[in-house]
Amino acid sequence: MKKKWTNKLMTMFSGNSIYKKEYNKELQRFEALFNYASIGILVTNEKGQIVLINDFALRQFGYEREELMGDYIEKLMPQRFRQRHVGHRDHYNHHPQSRPMGIGLDLFAVKKDGSEFPVEISLSQYRHDEGSFVIAYINNITERKKAEEKIEKLNNELEHKISERTQQLTTALEQLEQSKQEVMTALDKEKELSELKSRFVSMASHEFRTPLSTILSSAFLVNQYTTETEQPKRAKHIQRIISSVTLLTEVLNDFLSVGKIEEGGVQVRTSTFDIQQHINGIIMEMQDIVQEGQRIQYTHNGATSVQLDPSLLKHILLNLLGNAIKFSGKHTVIQVSTEQTGNDVILKVKDTGIGISQEDQQHLFERFFRGANVSNIQGTGLGLHIVSRYAELMNGNITCESVLNEGTTFIVTFRQL
């Protein structure tokens, strides 16, 4: 084909030696550009046959020129792509435009020895009186692919290392946060223990000082009353001593109970018993400490046979009744009720005493807490804390309903297993 173009141009310029000379120069420049280009260039006709191919392309594919001239372009493609490419080629011939080939795809060419290599291909098209032709610019990108793969591998390794370091850092931060939380928890516990110790020392010194002073002064006075006529005075002070010793015993029992609860030393021993008889027996024991004119009324609804720990139930009722008696005035009625509904057993203790403020109710079951309006009444601030913990041990809970100067109702609900 190149000879046809050359002959045609020579005929056109044969009458003019100047034009012929210029044509030869342009032809040499074209041949130099075509043959010495550092990229493979080939030209195909409308049928896809190779009509021109430069030296660089021949070296890329390992062919001699006569082996490719007139052959179809699919010869330079891997076998798996050849049939499909015929359709692509026909489509391009109907819609020709200068553009990269296979945008977004990995393209491969095949050498004479059958080995494949990755390529980039750009297409352009031109037409003259001999027909339409397609120019393909073929660039072997094997080294670039290797570099890209190497870079990708390095990137993957780097991302993996970054991921590992990030995970290590995250783990370290989590461990640091956990250690921080553990330290903060330990500090909070230490602070709480310190506060409890201070409150215990303050409370114990106050609660012990008064009965011990009473015991000491009464014992001294008893020793002074030696005659028979002074027996009533001796009896009065002996009773004071007994009451003070009882108070000290109660304080120490509260301390021991809290210690046993915290150490897990309180065991729940469930048994079946008649709750009505049990409550009546506890109320009888409390008659010795009721104030003048005070009455305890008891009612029960539902079945009387329950499955609870009778000992812990007694401790709970003794504490609640003791508070109701202590914080209610003379000539008042304290109401106790029990009810069994389904698996629930409900105990209520209601008084008409001094009541508890809404603010104090939020801290009512904390250790050593005492309401602002009971500072002149003896107590350790441990009783309700013990009651709440005993209730928890028996799968129950305690709530409080109270209005200042109108009274208080404690409701303990037990869930029978």
Image (cartoon, grey):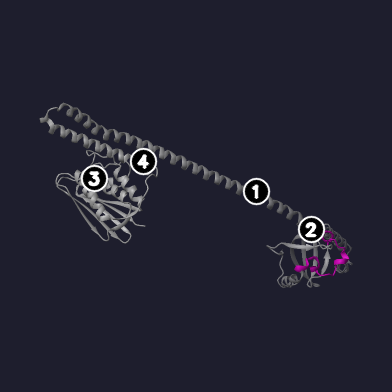
In the rendered structure, which segment of residues is drawn in magenta? 54-81
Residues under numbered marks 3 and 4 in contact, where contact means CB atoms less than 8 Å apart: no
Residue holding disc 1: 158
The front one of 258 and 26 is 258
Give the Cα separation between the discs numbered 3 and 2. 105 Å
Pinpoint residue 205: horizontal percent, then vertical percent: 29, 33
Amino acid type, mark 1: Leu
Q: How far, Cα to Cα, is label 4 from label 2? A: 92 Å
- Is disc 3 placed on a helix, strand or loop? helix
Q: Which mark is residue 259?
A: 4
- Residue drawn at x 24%, y 49% is 282
State the CA–CA distance, disc 3 to disc 4.
21 Å
Q: Which mark is on residue 322? A: 3
The mark that comes first in sequence, 3 or 2, is: 2
1 vs 2, front mark: 1
Can you see residue 224?
A: yes
Q: Within the image, what quadrant is residue 298 found in?
A: bottom left
**Residue tagged 2:** 39
Marks 1 and 2 in Cβ contact (< 8 Å): no
**Of marks 3 and 2, the one in the foreground:** 3
Earlier-in-chain disc, 4 versus 1: 1
Q: Is residue 307 above or below residue 233?
A: below
